Image (cartoon, rainbow, N blue to C red):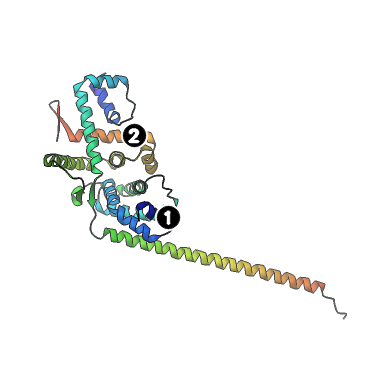
Amino acid sequence: MRCEDVALILPRAVDAGEPVDLAVQSHVGSCLTCQAELARYHRLLKALRNLRTQYLVPAPGTLAQTLAALGEAQERNAIRSILSGRRSAYIGALGGAAVAAGAAAAAVALARRRAPRLAG
Amino acid sequence: MTQEELVAAARDGDQGAFEELVRQTYVATYTLAFRLTGNEEDARDVVQETYLRAWKAIRRFRGDAQFSTWLYRITANTASSMTQRRSRNRADSLDEGSAEVVDDRPFANPEASSEASALHQRLSAAMADLPPKLRTIVVLKDVYDLPHEAIAEELGISVAAAKVRLHRARKRLRDVLFEERGGVARAV
């Protein structure tokens, strides 16, 4: 196995738990060049991990802007929710009224049918 | 209130609890957004959109993962959508010099601190030169330690594609950070 071939595998092999071919392991074990290359990848990964604790400070006022936008969205949602509730109530009321009107009409029709007819 | 209690309250619709979560996580979310998008303006938009999405979805957050991890995934998804939209209109650039960096780790050794700081600067510059697709993967995996599966899901790509991109990104960073001269590698 050549160092050039190993170099292609090292970006993956540097991950703990990644399966690495025995031939690669054997080559790296006996090749100082590839060991140095592997060490560079380890150093790179360590530097990348360290970035996580290095925070970038946002410009003043950005948190306030985000909270304001969030507040507006929450307000819109609340209003939509209320309107949606009212719409449901209106629809329910209209439905109820329609049913009641239908029932009343049916009752009137039934009553007329049952009422004795006066002789002319 | 602990963060878990705040999350529970927010899930029950407590807007104040959610706003407190925003305050607690804002700098971390902004930092990730900046690293993904590469500029302050987009980072601000991504953060705002992230919290709006998080508020809408908080009821579905089951607490299987940490709240911060859940937020990172939303940030990654939001930044990915925005980067795709905006990359059509303008060249991508990353200039960390425009945002102040705060390192919260104590350094006992000034020389080590200086070396780490130099490496950090070179690394930031090298990441700036990565194409957005490669940079996103390396930030999410090697900086924030999100699993390949989660990254693939948020970016809408396969796990295999995520791994290939990650290895390409690492190779590029290695090439920039450790320049080969006369057969001897040295940090530049």
Q: Earlier in the sequence, mark 2 or mark 1?
A: 1
Residue positioned 23% across, 28% down in the render: A38
Question: Residue A56: x percent and y percent?
Answer: 23, 50
Q: Where, quadrant-wise, is the C terminus of chain A in this rendering?
A: bottom right
Residue positioned 31% across, 59% down in the render: A66
- Residue B170: which quarter of the image? top left
Local secondary structure at mark 1: helix
Crowd tier of the residue under label 1, counting other residues whose Cα lies within 10 Å: few below 14, some 14–19, many 20 or above: many
Which of the numbered marks, if any, corresponds to residue B11?
1
- Residue A14: which quarter of the image? top left
Q: What's the CA distance linking mark 2 and mark 1? A: 34 Å
**Chain ID at mark 1:** B
- The answer to the question of whether label 2 and label 1 lie on touching residues, with beta carbons closer than 8 A, is no
Frontmost residue, A90 versus B105: B105
Q: Are marks 2 and 1 on the same chain?
A: yes
Amino acid at pointer 1: Arg
Q: Is residue A6 above or below residue B107?
A: above
Residue at mark 2: B163
Question: Residue A42: x percent and y percent?
Answer: 23, 32
Q: Where, quadrant-wise, is the N terminus of chain A in this rendering?
A: top left
On the rendered structure, is A88 left or right of A31? right
